[in-house]
Amino acid sequence: MTFKQKLANIIRKNNSLLCIGLDPDLDKIPKHILKKKNPIFEFNKKIIDETSDLVCCYKTQFAFYASHGIPGIKALIRTIKYIHLKHPSIPVILDAKRGDIGSTATQYAKEVFDVYLADAVTVNPFLGFDSLKPFLERKDKGIIILARTSNPGAGDFQDLIINKKPLYIKVAEKVTVWNEIYKNCLMVVGATWPEQLRKVRKIAPEMFFLIPGIGAQGGDLEKTLQVGLTKNKSGLIISSSREIIFSANPRLEALKLIEEINKYR
């Protein structure tokens, strides 16, 4: 089963477009969990067990694990294996934003899919097609390509005009071409830029978009859904991490966000 098929199935089953970001921060993890032998994994496990019937996927941000060295990487691998074992219908995105020359990209693809066992990965298209080809050739995986990111400085380069079009539009157009060949492309488009999201949706009317920026970054959920949903009221992976995982009741916060999402679907 491909990532896209797995994603579509769990969206129907859980009636959810919510992706919870498993981004553990030792400064915010409850003290009783910090006392455990593997606090990062134990923190993630608690979130997963409380929310597995509420999500369409989980997303692990690589930096939150790599910054802890080998113990963090082991926690990442253990977290993804746990999801595959206990909740095999839920796909896992590794938010790694990989992108390098072809030979290096080949090794990154092996790392992401064969070591960490991710179902999908975020990649940076700045180096062009050859830097993404090793990922795209993994046709059962999801290749989530940065188009218009959610951060405040996104426009420094992504809005630059290239042949009368903003760079993010040129990227979106190229992604649709690659998707015709490989069938496994998605795009990252931030909720903090609803007008840009509307334009990208016109270019890719049926493609799935990973949507960061809801919650702590201040993205407008209603506008995001109004301009970003596909005709069948799907096509978005709404990512939220801090607002859910560090709350007093992660399940309750996830339910609140799902209800708000579905209100506008």
Image (cartoon, rainbow, N blue to C red):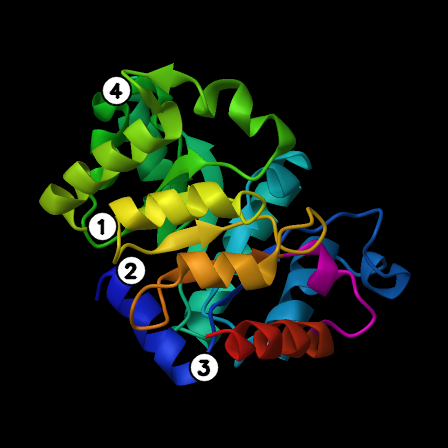
Tag shown at residue 237:
none
- Distance (Cα) linking label 4 and label 3: 39 Å
The residue beneath circle 1 is: 184
Q: Are marks 3 and 2 in contact (CB under 8 Å)?
A: no
Kind of residue indicated by mark 2: Phe
Q: Earlier in the sequence, mark 4 or mark 3?
A: 3
Residue 204, how many percent across, how many down?
26, 49
Q: Identify the residue position indicated by label 2 in the image.
A: 3
Which residue in the protein does label 3 denote? 14
Q: Earlier in the sequence, mark 1 or mark 4?
A: 4
In the visual, does 20 lie left or right of 169? right
Tag nearer the camera, 3 or 2: 3
State left or right for residue 162 relative to residue 134. Answer: right
Q: Amino acid at mark 4?
A: Ser
**Who's the residue at 68% across and 71% down the image?**
46
Pick the quarter of the image with the N terminus.
bottom left
Q: Amino acid at mark 1?
A: Asn
- Contact (Cβ within 8 Å) of mark 1 with mark 2: yes
